[in-house]
Image (cartoon, helix red, strand yellow):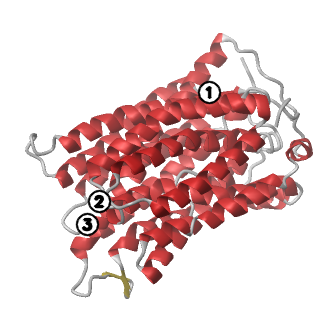
Amino acid sequence: MTTAPAAGPTAPPADRALRRERFGWYSYDWAMSVFNTSVTTVFLGPYLTSVAEEAAGPDGRLPFLGLGIPPGSWFSYVLSVSVILQVVVLPLTGAVADRTGRKRQLLGGFAALGAVATTGLFFVADGRYLLGAALFVVANISFGAATVVYYSWLPDLAGPDERDAVSSRGWAFGYVGGALLLAVHLGLVLGAESLGLTTGEAVRICLATAGLWWGAFTVFTISRLRDRPVPAAAARPRSGFRQLAATLKEMRAFPLTLWFLGAYLLFNDGVQTVIALSATYAVEELGLQQSVLTGAILMVQVVAIAGALGLGRLAARYGAKRVVLGSLVAWIGVLVAAFFLQAGAVGQFYALAAVIGLVQGGTQALSRSLFSQLIPAGREAEYFGFYEISDRGTSWLGPLAFGLTFQLTGSYRLAIISLVIFFVAGFVALAALPVRRAVLAAGNTPPERL
C-alpha cells in the first residue's frame, strides 16, 4: 500500500495499484473537462448573453439590484461573482480535506452538486437570466472545490521528477474527453433544424448533457482513488475556519511559494479570461456563427492533446519554468492577433485557435506540477485551494477588466487587448522567482530540471 510522501518525496514505485490509481486520477480530468469546454468556453457565454438580451428593458439594460447592466457584460460579471465567493469556499474546502483526509467523499460530493446545477441549465430560457446566473455560480463554485481536492492527489501519485509528465497526461485525458463530447455537441447544433430543434433548444441539451457526463464519469474516478492517512499534526480537531486561519499564518513562512501564487494569479487571470470569454468575443465582435465557434474549440481540444504532452516533454529537457515563460510570450501574441482579426474571417480565427491549443494545456499542466513542488507536505489541498481561486475560468480580475472595458468603451476589441497586462505582469513575476530555492524552502527535494 502506497502512502503519501513526506517532505522531500521520491518517486513512488509504479506498481499495479499506483498505475490503477493514476488512471483513476486522469479520468477525472476526462469527466470535468466538459464543463470548461462545452459550458464555460463554448455555449453558456453567448447563450446567457442572448437570454439576457431578451430580458433587457426598453433602455437595452438589465435590471439588477437597482442597476442597469449591459447584457454584453452580464456573463463576465457572473464569472466575477463566482470567484469572489470562491475566495472563501475553496481554501476552506482544502482545509477540511487536509484535516479529515476524506478526499474521496469531498470530491464526489462537490462534483455531484456541480453536475446537477449544470444539468439544470437546461431550464434557462425565456429571459431567465437570473436562473442561469445562479445555476452557473453554484456549478462553478462546486467545480472549483472539487478541483482543489483533485489536484491535491498529485504529490501522492508522482515524485518530483514525474509530476510534469503525470500532470500533462491528466490534461491530455481531459482534452480527449472534452473533444469527444464537444464533437457530439457540434453535430447536435449543426443538425438542430433537421432534428426539429431550435438552436437555443440544442444548446440547452448540450449544457444538460455536459452535466450528466461530469457526474457519470466522476463515479469511475471515485472507485479508483484512495484516501491517505492524515498526519497526526494535521488531524487535530479544529474547525475548517480555524484550520484555514492557521494555514494563512503558516504561509507567511513560505514567501517564495506566495510569490509563485502571485505570479500565477496574474498570468492565469489572462489565460482563464481568454478561455471563458473567447466565445463571446467571437460571436459579438467577429460575427461568427455558433457552428464556426464550436468547430474552432473542437480543434483546440484536439491540438491541445499534442500541445500538453509536447510541452511536458519540453519541460523534461528545459524545465517547467522556462516552458511556462515561453508559453506566456505566445499568449501575448495571441491577444495582439485577436485585436486585429477581421470580422467574419473564419480562417484567421481557426489559425489563432490552433496556436491557443498548442500552449493552453501546457501552461496549465506545468503550472500545476510546478506549484505542487512548492507546497509543504501534508498541506496539499489547503494550498491548492488558494491556487484554484484563479484557475479554470474562476479568475475575477480578468473578467472584471474585460467587462468594465467593454462597458466604458463599447468595444470588444479594446476589452480583449486589455488582458495583455496580466500576461506581461505574470511573466515578469515568474521570471524573477528563484524556483529551486522555493522548493527547498518548502522542505521538498527539487526535480533535476526546473
Type of amino acid at the residue the image marks with label 1: Arg
Q: Residue at x 37, y 31 (%)?
A: 180
Compare marks 1 and 3 and give the one earlier in the sequence. Answer: 3
Inspect this view and state whether residue 7 appears.
yes
Q: Is residue 297 above or below residue 386?
A: above
Label for residue 72?
none
Viewport quadrant of the C terminus:
top right
Do callouts 3 and 2 mark residues in contact (Cβ within 8 Å)? yes
Secondary structure under the numbered disc 3 in the rendered image? helix
Name the image quarter holding residue 70. bottom left
Q: In this rendering, is residue 86 above or below 377?
A: below
In the image: residue 58, left or right of residue 321: left
Q: Residue at x 72, y 48 (%)?
A: 325
Per the image, label 1 sits on a secondary structure element best described as loop
Residue 82, x across and y down, in percent: 50, 63
Q: Residue type at mark 3?
A: Val
C-alpha span from label 1 to label 2: 39 Å
- Which SS class for mark 2? helix
Q: Which mark is residue 226?
A: 1
Q: Which mark is residue 47?
A: 2
Name the residue tied to disc 3: 51
Q: Is residue 450 above or below residue 257?
A: above
